Image (cartoon, coloured by chain):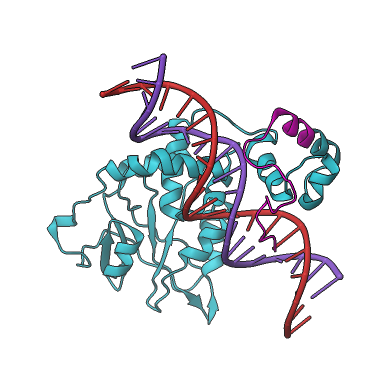
Chain colours: A cyan, B purple, C red
Amino acid sequence: MEKKPCNNGDGLNKGAWTALEDKLLVSYITAAGEGKWRSVPKQAGIKRCGKSCRLRWLNYLRPNIKRGNISEEEEDLIIRLHKLLGNRWALIAGRLPGRTDNEIKNYWNTTLSKKVRTQNFAINKPNNKPWGHNSKPQQNATSSTSIPTLIQTKPLRCTKASHPYFPLQIPSSIDGVDQTQQIIQQNFGDEIMEEEKKESAMVNNNDLLFFYDAMWTDELEFENWSKGGDDYDGILCNDDWFYGSSDTDIWQNF
DNA sequence: AAGGTGGACAACCGCCTAAAG
DNA sequence: TCTTTAGGCGGTTGTCCACCT
């Protein structure tokens, strides 16, 4: 573990990188490639710790980094991803080509968090019913014999900036075999991130209920769903719909 | 012009995890 | 199986700069 601070008395530089240091690092990595960060400073002739070199390269020097203003589309995506993933900046950055986790984290902390806070995320409850009360959207029946397909109700969502939630009504297992992954794969394919799979398989209550929240990568399709979408997040369980303004709300009301 | 303030962002720090020995 | 190491991650801090008084 590299627990020592970078400047541990070895005369290493700290603070802003100079143009010369940048040049040395770029030319070294261009020749030798990334990795073995601990040995990089010595090999490249830089008085920095390896960790500092790695960070400088990843966040600033490496090719294909997109610099400059974050577009509205990127901003919208960051907001939606943050709602889905929380402060997992590296994952969020992975969906924004050319952007670094550090940049997105900074942008969130300085700009977007305030923006999102000031937006009115309050949602109106359906027919003024209390949270957790039955208010079931129309839906189809579930096949009970073959591999089930997605029985999809309308995607439920809070705002335009939010991703749609899909309450799925599917058997959790067939002949004792868990079908979850297969069903997700059939219906969403590779568009669902591995991380989402882990975190979204939250409800599996023996009553043909499974809740999954999906994220469109196809923006047009997302927009189409958005236009027809409801104004609420919710999950279906035993013919009851549970609503909330966030995942946490929903699960508390559940 | 000088000092204060806040925003933006680069860089650091400490913790965590996976891989290697 | 345990320990060590390297790299990755998110929170936090430091610094620069524009703007305001």
Quarter of the figure with residue A210: bottom left
Residues A180 and A203: in front is: A203
Q: Is residue A14 magenta?
A: yes
Q: Is residue A42 magenta?
A: no
Q: Is residue A228 left or right of residue A12?
A: left
Asked if residue A237 shows in the view, the reply is yes
Q: Is residue A55 left or right of residue A30?
A: left
Asked if residue A221 shows in the view, the reply is no
Q: Is residue C8 left or right of residue A91?
A: right
Q: Chief secondary structure of the magenta span?
A: loop
Residues B17 and A188: in front is: B17
Q: Residue at x 18, y 56 (%)?
A: A126
Tell me if residue A32 comes above or below residue A177 in the rendering.
Answer: above
Q: Residue at x 35, y 60 (%)?
A: A247
Residue interval drawn in magenta: A1-26
Return the x and y of residue B1 as percentages of the image width and height: 41, 14
Q: Residue at x 70, y 64 (%)?
A: A1
Return the x and y of residue A135 as percentages of the image width and height: 21, 63
